[in-house]
Amino acid sequence: PFALSKAEAATATPNGAASIYSNPALLAYNKSSTIDLGYSFWIANVNNIFGGVNFKKGKRAVAFSFYTSGADDYQQYNQPGDPNGTFSVQYISIAAAYAYDFNYFSAGGAVQYLNEEIFTYRANGYAFNFGLATKFQQDKIRLGASITNLGEMGKLNIRSTPLPTNLKIGTSADLIEFAAPKNNHLPILLTVYADFVHPLQETNGKDYADYKS
């Protein structure tokens, strides 16, 4: 949910264990070890559940996470009339990552085990995420670059589902920090984020209208 609140512009922003999926190099930039749990209820009754842990020790970081997304109660028909029943759509990712801070920059990589289930069909697959990150101006400005979802899925009935492999370049900057009125112990930080995303593999299914067709 934290990454979604920033429109997933997280290529240059440490997000705890969730950085496994955006830029694993950022795992080394977390100030301490973290445990993250998240749940979001999305459009069309889609449930997203995330959990992860990032063990930070010195310049090294090791992280593990799981992420599920899916929905149920889809009706199945063979012909017009009453439905034969309902079915679910479910996606699962189980990941592990490692990152190291080389002082001037950090580098990290992650491997994912993937599983998808649609109706009675199931498929397994794998994916890799790689990333680089750097920071300067007393850690107020951060830059990051990553390649995510580099891998493949097994056949789901007839063909395999293409993975959304992306090249991402991002930046984030802390602009202003001040204390809340009448409460000096509640700091307020204004930060800007920006990501450039270039798909490295075209996917057939789109969640937007293609007006060129």
Image (spheres, rainbow, N blue to C red):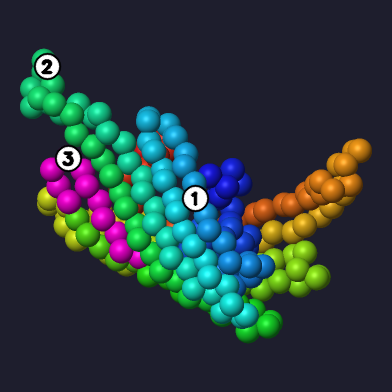
> For numbered disc 3, what is the local secondary structure?
loop
Q: Which residues are magenta?
A: 112-122
Vertically, is 29 above or below 116? below
Is residue 103 inside the magenta stretch? no
Residue 58, which numbered label?
Answer: none
Residue 30 lies, in percent from the top left, at 63, 67
Q: Residue at x 26, y 40 (%)?
A: 89
Q: Is residue 164 above or below residue 79?
A: below
Q: Position of residue 69 (x, y in %)?
A: 36, 45
Numbered disc 2: secondary structure? loop
Q: Amino acid at mark 1?
A: Leu
Q: Earlier in the sequence, mark 2 or mark 1?
A: 1
* Residue located beneath label 1 in the image: 37
Q: Residues within 10 Å of mark 2 (few under 14, many from 20)?
A: few
Secondary structure of residue under mark 1: strand
Q: Which residue is mark 2?
A: 82
- Residue ID at (49%, 62%): 53
Q: Which residue is mark 3?
A: 119
Question: In the picture provided, is 169 more to the left or to the right than 124?
Answer: right
From the viewer's perspective, tell me whether residue 166 is left or right of residue 100: left
Q: Position of residue 48 (x, y in %)?
A: 41, 43
**Is 196 or 4 nearer to us in this picture?**
4
Residue ranking furthest to the bottom: 102
Q: Residue at x 80, y 70 (%)?
A: 138
Q: Quadrant of the C terminus?
A: top left
Image position of 120 with respect to 65: above or below: above
Visible residue check, residue 170: no
Q: Looking at numbered disc 2 in the image, what kind of residue is underneath it?
A: Asp
